[in-house]
Amino acid sequence: MTRAQAWSVHLATLAVGGTGLVYGWMRYVPEPADEFALVNHPLQPTLQHLHLLFAPLLVFAAAAIWGSHVWARVRVGFRPSRPTGLALFALFFPMVLSGAWVQVAEGELARKFAIGLHAGSSALWCAAYALHVVVQAWRGKIGPSAESAAASKRSA
């Protein structure tokens, strides 16, 4: 994975995860000032729109690293040293598909199930992503020294 690919995934995750968490808080935590209000917070529609605009960026960034980073490691099989990566792999599709399902669900039960699945898989995905980045940095696989070591391996 190139540095540009890594940063695109980091930034897309931050944008989608951040707007999703703030939107979720705005949607479900505060009480509306007026009992007839359609939103609980004045910025709620803006955060929802931003979340929906940033989500394809995460899908595109994940697609960019799919072959060289994700699928290459999934083919190797489960290794105890890669639980966060495998968790990200397992949670990505439920997160993305349930996010689309929330937008098109017609029945109340289906919509509530889609929201629950999306919120749960997204929260777990964000936690696993943060842990994945921290573990990789701790192992020295992220940063200038890791990049120069990888470049020296390629040139040798």
Image (cartoon, helix red, strand yellow):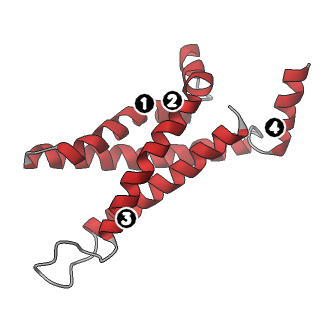
Q: CA distance from mark 3 to mark 2?
A: 29 Å
Q: Looking at the picture, how far across and down is residue 104, in whole percent?
A: 19, 44
- Distance from Cα at disc 4 to Cα at disc 3: 35 Å
Name the residue rendered at 54%, 21% in the picture.
Answer: 71
Question: Label 1, on which residue?
Answer: 90
Query: Circle 3 is placed at which residue position?
Result: 47
Mark 3 and mark 1 lie on one chain; the one further toward the N terminus is: 3
Residue 19 figure quarter? bottom left
Task: Write down the residue under mark 4.
Answer: 147
Q: Are marks 1 and 2 in contact (CB under 8 Å)?
A: yes
Q: How far apart in space, not on screen, are marks 3 and 1 (Cα)?
A: 26 Å
Q: Nearer the viewer, mark 3 or mark 2?
A: 3
Q: In the image shown, does 84 or 2 lie closer to the viewer?
A: 2
Where in the figure is residue 98, as x and y percent of width and height? Answer: 28, 40
Tell me if residue 116 comes above or below residue 31 in the rendering: above
**Relative image position of residue 24 (x, y in whole percent):** 33, 61
Viewer-nearest of labels 4 and 2? 4
Q: CA distance from mark 4 to mark 2?
A: 23 Å
Question: Which residue does the numbered mark 2 point to in the structure image?
Answer: 86
Q: Identify residue type, mark 2.
A: Leu
As drawn, the residue found furthest toward the bottom would be 33
Q: Residue at x 40, y 50 (%)?
A: 123
Of tags 1 and 4, the one toward the viewer is 4
In space, the residues marked 1 and 4 are separated at their CA atoms by 27 Å
Judge by depth and name the residue closer to the eye, 46 or 81. Answer: 46
Q: For this view, does 78 lie left or right of residue 40?
A: right
Q: Residues within 10 Å of mark 3 (few under 14, many from 20)?
A: many
